[in-house]
C-alpha cells in the first residue's frame, strides 16, 4: 500500500546556466526546502527488483523560497517522482511515499515542464504545464485527490484496531479504490488515443485488461508507456492461465509432468520421483516469507527424507540470484529453475496455478496431487505430517 522510499540523498541538483532545466516551478507552503526526486527509465520499470535497484536514481534538490529547478540529461522516456520531504512518512526508520505526497511526471528527450504546486496539510496539490501528457495526468490526479486522501485516512486508521475492525476498514478502502479505478478506466475509454489511457490501463484488473486494451487507439498503444502495458498484458495472460489451471491441480488430479534444469545444469523430470512422496516448493530468492520458512522446511525434510523428496522450484528470479540463494541457504533438496519471462504456456508455475509465494504442493507416490498450500503457515506442515507419518 505504501511505497518504500530509502532516502539515498545522492546530490543536490542546480539550475543549468546554458539550457532550460527539464523541470522547474514553484511550490507554496514548504516548511522544509528539501525535495526528493526519484527517476527511472520507463523501459526499465517492468523488471525492477526493488527500490534499491541500481537503475533507479535518487536525488535531492533545494527549493529555496519555494522555487525549484532540476536538470539531468533525458535521452529516453523517463519517469520522475517528486515529493516534498516534509510529506514523507517514517515507519521503522524508513521513509515512505503516501498517495498524496508526490507528483509523477514523464519526460522524453527535449521535453521540459513547469510545476505549480502548494502543500495543503499532508497533500501535495500540483499542476504541470509544458507537455500535454503531463498536463492531463496532473489534472486527473487533482480530481483523484479526495479519493486518495480518504484512502490514506482509512489506511492509517487501521493501526492498533482489532482484526475484525481492520477487515471492515479494508473493505471500505477497497470500495474507494475501485471508484478511483473505474474513474480512470472511464477516462481511458473516453480518450482512447491519449497516452494517459495507456498509462491508466496498466492498473486495470488482469481479467479485463485485454478487453480494454482492444479499445485503445494505436497512438496510445505505441506511446511511451508501451513497455509498461506490454508487460502488464503478459502478466494478465499468465494470470488468466493460472485461473484456468486451478481445476487441473485440485486434490486427486495427476501432477503435471515437467522437465527443468537443476543447480548442476542437468535435466530433472518430476516423473523420476514416482513411488515417493514429493513436495514441490515454489519460491524465489526475492520472497521474504519463502526464506523465512527454510529452517522449518529443513527440519521436516530431515524427519521424512527416507520417504519424501522436496523439489524447490525457483520462480521470477535470475539464474545468478537463484544459484546464490541455493548456496547461501544450503538447500539440501533438489533445486530447479523455472525460467523467467517464458511464455505462460511454458511456465511451470502457471501449469500448477501458482498465484502467490511460497506455494507448496504435496504429491503422493502414485503421482496424484494430495494438496496445495499457499503462504507460509502451519496448514502445510500439519498436512505433510498426517500424510507421511
Image (cartoon, helix red, strand yellow):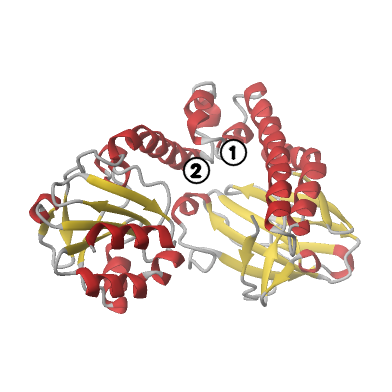
Q: Nearer the viewer, residue 363 or 201?
A: 363
Residue 33 in percent (x, y) is at 83, 71
Q: Which residue is denoted by mark 1 in the rendering?
A: 199
Circle 2 SS class: helix
| Mark 2 / mark 1, whichever is N-terminal | 1
Q: Secondary structure at mark 1?
A: helix
Which of 266/334 is in front?
334
Q: Horizontally, is 188 left or right of 157 in the view?
A: left
Indicate the quadrant containing the N terminus: top left, top right, bottom left or bottom right. Answer: bottom right
Residue at the image position 65 percent from the left and 58 percent from the top? 2
Assign the C terminus to one quadrant of the image.
bottom left
Tag 2 residue: 228
Residue at 64% in and 28% down: 188
Within 10 Å of the Cα at label 1, are there few (<14), some (14-19), or many (20+) other Cα atoms? Answer: many
Say which quarter of the image contains residue 6: bottom right
Residue at 90 percent of width and 68 percent of height: 65
Which residue is located at x 67 percent, y 33 percent?
Answer: 184
Amino acid at each position: 500500500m505504501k511505497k518504500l522510499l530509502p532516502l539515498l540523498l545522492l546530490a543536490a541538483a542546480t539550475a543549468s546556466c546554458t539550457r532550460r532545466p527539464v523541470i522547474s516551478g514553484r511550490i507554496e507552503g514548504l516548511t522544509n526546502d528539501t525535495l526528493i526526486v526519484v527517476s527511472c527509465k520507463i523501459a526499465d520499470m517492468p523488471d525492477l527488483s526493488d527500490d534499491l535497484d541500481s537503475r533507479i536514481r535518487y536525488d535531492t534538490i533545494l527549493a529555496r523560497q519555494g522555487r525549484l529547478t532540476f536538470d539531468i540529461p533525458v535521452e529516453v522516456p523517463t519517469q520522475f517522482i517528486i515529493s516534498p520531504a516534509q510529506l514523507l512518512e517514517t515507519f521503522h526508520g524508513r521513509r515512505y511515499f503516501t498517495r498524496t505526497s508526490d507528483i509523477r511526471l514523464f519526460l522524453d528527450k527535449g521535453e521540459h515542464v513547469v510545476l505549480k504546486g502548494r502543500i495543503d496539510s499532508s497533500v501535495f496539490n500540483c499542476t504541470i504545464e509544458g507537455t500535454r501528457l503531463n498536463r492531463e495526468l496532473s489534472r486527473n490526479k487533482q480530481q483523484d485527490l479526495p479519493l486518495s486522501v480518504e484512502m490514506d485516512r482509512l489506511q492509517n486508521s487501521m493501526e492498533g484496531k482489532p482484526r475484525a475492525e481492520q477487515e471492515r476498514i479494508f473493505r471500505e478502502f477497497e470500495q474507494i479504490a475501485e471508484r478511483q479505478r473505474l474513474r480512470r478506466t472511464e477516462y481511458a475509454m473516453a480518450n482512447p488515443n491519449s497516452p494517459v489511457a495507456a498509462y491508466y490501463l496498466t492498473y486495470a484488473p488482469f481479467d479485463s485488461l485485454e478487453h480494454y486494451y482492444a479499445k485503445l487507439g494505436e497512438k496510445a498503444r505505441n506511446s511511451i508507456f508501451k513497455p509498461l502495458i506490454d508487460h502488464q498484458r503478459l502478466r494478465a495472460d499468465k494470470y488468466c492461465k493460472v485461473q484456468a489451471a486451478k481445476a487441473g491441480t485440485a486434490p486427486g488430479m495427476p501432477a503435471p509432468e515437467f522437465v527443468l534444469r537443476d543447480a548442476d545444469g542437468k535435466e530433472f523430470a518430476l516423473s523420476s520421483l514416482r513411488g515417493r512422496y514429493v513436495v514441490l516448493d515454489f519460491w524465489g530468492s526475492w520472497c521474504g516469507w519463502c526464506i523465512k520458512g527454510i529452517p522449518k522446511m529443513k527440519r521436516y525434510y530431515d524427519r521424512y527424507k527416507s520417504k519424501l523428496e522436496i523439489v524447490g522450484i525457483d520462480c521470477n528470479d535470475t539464474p545468478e540470484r537463484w544459484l546464490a540463494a541455493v548456496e547461501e541457504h544450503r538447500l539440501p533438496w533438489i533445486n530447479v529453475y523455472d525460467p523467467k519471462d517464458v511464455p505462460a504456456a511454458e511456465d511451470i508455475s502457471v501449469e500448477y496455478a501458482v498465484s502467490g509465494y511460497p506455494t507448496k504442493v504435496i504429491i503422493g507416490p502414485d503421482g496424484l496431487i494430495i494438496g496445495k498450500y499457499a503462504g507460509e503457515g502451519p496448514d502445510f506442515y500439519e498436512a505433510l505430517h498426517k500424510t507421511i507419518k
